[in-house]
Image: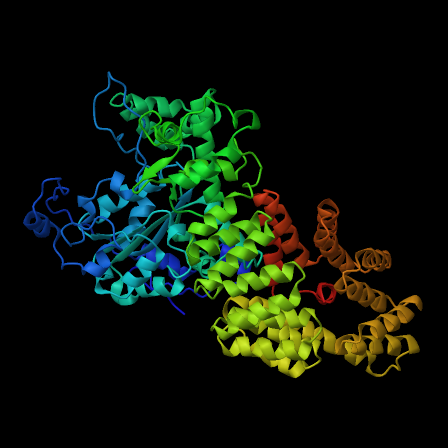
Amino acid sequence: MAIRFGAANWLLVSSSPVRNVLEGLSWPAAILAVLLAVPWRRRKQRKEPFGPYDTAERVSERAGGEVIPASLRERLLHVKCGRLPLVEQVGLLELRVKRAIERDAQSPGPDMPAYVGRDVDTSLDEVVEGGGIVLLHGRAATGKTRIAAEAVRRCCPEHTLVVPVDGPALRELASTRFLEGDVVLWLDDLERFLTPGGLDLGVLQKLCAEESTRVVVVATIRDQQLAKYETARLIGEQEFDRAAADLVAAIPPERRIRVGQDLTRTESKRAQLLRTRDTRIGHALKAIEGFAEYLAAGRAMMDRWSIGDGPAHHCGAALISGAVDCRRAGYNEPVPGALLCRIQRHYLQPSWRDRADLPSAEEALRWAVEPVLGASSCLQPRADDLYLAPDYLLDRAQAGDSPLGTAKPPVQLWPELLQIAVATEAFNIGVSAHSLREPEVAITAFRQAVEGGFTSAHVNLGVLLESLQRDEEAAIEYTAAAEAGHSEGLLNLGLLRHKQGDLDDAVQQLQAAVDAGSREAEVNLAVVLAERGRSEEAEAAFRSITGSDETAAKFGLEHLKYERRRQKARAGTEPTENELRYRRGGILHESGSVAAAELAYRAAAEAGLVDARLDLALLLHEQRRVAEAEVEYRAVIGAGRREARFHLARLLETVGRSDEAHREYVLAAEAGAPSARYYLARMLWLAGRAEEAEEQVDLAAEFYASPSPSTEVGDAEK
């Protein structure tokens, strides 16, 4: 599969699943695509932006291009007289650049501060001029959108500007001729377009195909949102939309531009030259919170939300809190003012809820939407009495640095949101509810998404039910997903059957997933075949694997070789009675005779066979007999079998003993079990320790990418 970015081809064949996320795809061909891209800049006479009193004829003359069909006009922003504008004809505010704080009365001039050149401008210009996608990421209010807007105004002012209203609109536009030729596709806040039914890797391939190299896709995303996609792929979380995570992972690092919170030394020098013309720039240089954050009144908005007293402040701040929680709950569209007023009470302190001097809902809303220092407001009004909390406040809330603290959204909020949510919005609410440890809400939301026609939510619902140990309900959802054409349903059903010990059905389902095009099922099928003793089929399956899972396949082949050597070494030795008892336990276990298998394992274990005690512990673990499984795992560890630490850690994590699980994962990882590092990374990430999580994943990736993993570690991982 290949996507052509710019003048050269960028093959998006991923490496290992981990490096696909943390390192992207940085091959020599990708580097050459940037180095060899031929810069081109047109410097014709600038055309004036559209004015409020322009006639249709004047707009048509300057915009050029054919008339957009009426059916598409509502799916695009900034359409003038039925035609798409040029980049230079759309203002910064229209491109969603945040308003800046007001100028001093003694410092007249334009409302928007002069642009301070950034160190990333040169590399950004090269990418934009070459065509293809570029992604700017950073914290909220760091200047991402302004930097991107200035770049396209410098490099391609006379390109046609296309701004779709949402992901489905973009998908619809991708099949038309309006995304051909010299076009800038503007995707500010990329996550708004990565919704189910929106932008995915297939659509991006079409936009950046060889015959359309002049299309420039400019996207921005907040670091917190980017981390969600990367972590979802890194640790295999399926609650997130897989298509979105895959697309983000496919963007090479050379096309990811990070925007820092603070100016660099050279950027500060450039800003110093402008501070006499605009006092705001001088103040921003001294601001603790950061240059762009100060100009966008970020800290001032937080203060307005957090600090104050009196009825107006308490009621207005409660409305802001409710709007922020709507976004934390996964509803990222503007919400009705009536909804905010209904949930307002749950964000007021108990002593304020029944006071007689509280302002009316209209007065509280007026307080909440008032611009802060002339810039953005804490509650952004939209048409039709709709309101949206800004990204900056959402970032602070998700970081735990807001009046909401670490509290979950109140239970009364979820049904209010689901009542106004369409299928895709219900899906997003389900994802957020799951991440906020509200499983019943997530189940309700996913079911609503399915009923609304979003059939891939069957997969997410199945994953959630399986995590709640409701396996048969999960199997029903996986089957429904498969019947709707989603290969993930077959994959997950196969893995579920494998977990339940039905290896024959697992092979059947995984093979169906492979036939349906699931690359992820290929490795799983090979592993299950190996476990069934069908080593020749397993070897053939491993050898057929290419691309992102090739290193995992290499490890699987090494393990098969090790098993064959071990079996050959034992071939001339008569098995002891205990070994025969242990083997009989394995056969009983695979056939589903769990009680008889347990007796056989126990007898062999009591006779001193450590392998039997480990399998006994695993059987007890599967039966969720936690205390007994823990005793057996610790006995195996005491006998020197280090791989048992990994299984013990998983057991402890499932029962909420996180500190003990963390310790065991660390010990297992230090003993050489790479899988332990993935699970350790997941725990660290959920604890907010992202850098430590990435370090663990890198270490695991290094192991799997090594030319010949040791058989000793391979045996431990078995």
Find the residue positioned furthest to the top. Answer: 106
Q: Front-most of 344 and 160?
A: 344
Q: Is residue 647 left or right of residue 3?
A: right
Question: Is residue 553 something that shows in the picture?
Answer: no
Q: Front-most of 472 and 527?
A: 472
Figure coloring: rainbow
Identify whether 181 is placed above or below 281. below
Count numbered badges in the picture: 0
Q: Quadrant of the N terminus?
A: bottom left
Image spot of residue 322 (x, y percent):
47, 37
Q: What residue is shown at x 30% (from left), y 35% (from top)?
A: 117
Q: What residue is shown at x 74% (from left), y 59% (from top)?
A: 647
Q: Is residue 332 left or right of residue 518?
A: left
Question: Is residue 482 something that shows in the picture?
Answer: yes
Find the residue positioned furthest to the front. Answer: 356
Image spot of residue 386 (x, y percent):
35, 41
Identify whether 707 is placed above or below 224. below
Q: Is residue 226 left or right of residue 549?
A: left
Q: Front-most of 473 and 280?
A: 473
Q: Front-most of 229 and 278?
A: 229
Image spot of residue 231 (x, y percent):
54, 52
Q: Is residue 69 left or right of residue 657?
A: left
Q: Quadrant of residue 631?
A: bottom right
Image spot of residue 408 (x, y percent):
57, 41
Q: What residue is shown at x 54% (from left), y 70% (from top)?
A: 489
Q: What residue is shown at x 84% (from left), y 78% (from top)?
A: 584
